[in-house]
Amino acid sequence: MELPAFRREGSNKHIKDCERASQQLKFKIHALNNKERERATELASLHDMESTSRALHEEEREVESAFPSSIRGEPSSAYAGGPQGSDTRPHKSNFSSPSSVANAGTHSDSNPVFSQTLPQHSIQPPFRRTRQLPLLPMLDAAERE
């Protein structure tokens, strides 16, 4: 038994519609797979960032534990025994005596070549150092205030 002509055309149209719908579903599946891959990549990068963040925090804690407590702003236990306002730590002198600083660079009188080639006013003494205070006593003074 043969189907009437309008039935065959209808079934061909139905087949074409199904093929078109199937193709659209394939595109949607492909798009969803791409989104899934992107999400998986984002999730992996977030996991990497989280582990990196944890490692940085651990490293930060190690660095903080390596520094003395006075640098971190905590009260210093090593020098807590002295009276208020006194500093029992040894101070390192980083400056020259005033006479050696004042005389530095004024050798033009003793060197005849210098005094002949350059006028006296053009010879400037070197930058004079002021007394350099150690950093830690300044931090301790700031903590006391």
Image: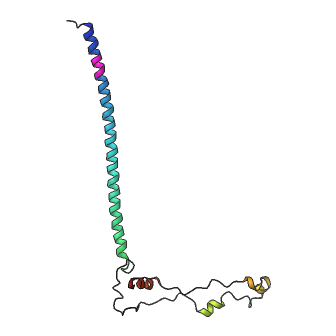
Q: Quadrant of the C terminus?
A: bottom left
Q: Name the chief secondary structure element in magenta.
A: helix
Of 55 and 9, the residue lying toward us: 9
Q: Is residue 63 left or right of residue 134?
A: left
Task: Tell me, yes or no, whether the highlighted magenta stretch contains residue 16.
Answer: yes
Q: Which residues are magenta?
A: 13-17
All told, the count of numbered labels is 0
Residue at 48% across, 88% down: 92
Give the image quarter of residue 33: top left
Query: Which image quarter is the N terminus in?
Result: top left
Identify which residue, 47 or 18, lies in the foreground. 18
Is 99 included in the stretch rendered in magenta?
A: no
Task: Locate residue 36, reporting x and y percent.
Answer: 31, 42
Height in image: 102 above or below 28?
Answer: below
Asked which quadrant contains residue 122, the reply is bottom right
Q: Position of residue 61 (x, y in %)?
A: 34, 70
Q: Residue lying furthest front in this view?
A: 145
Q: Residue at x 79, y 82 (%)?
A: 117
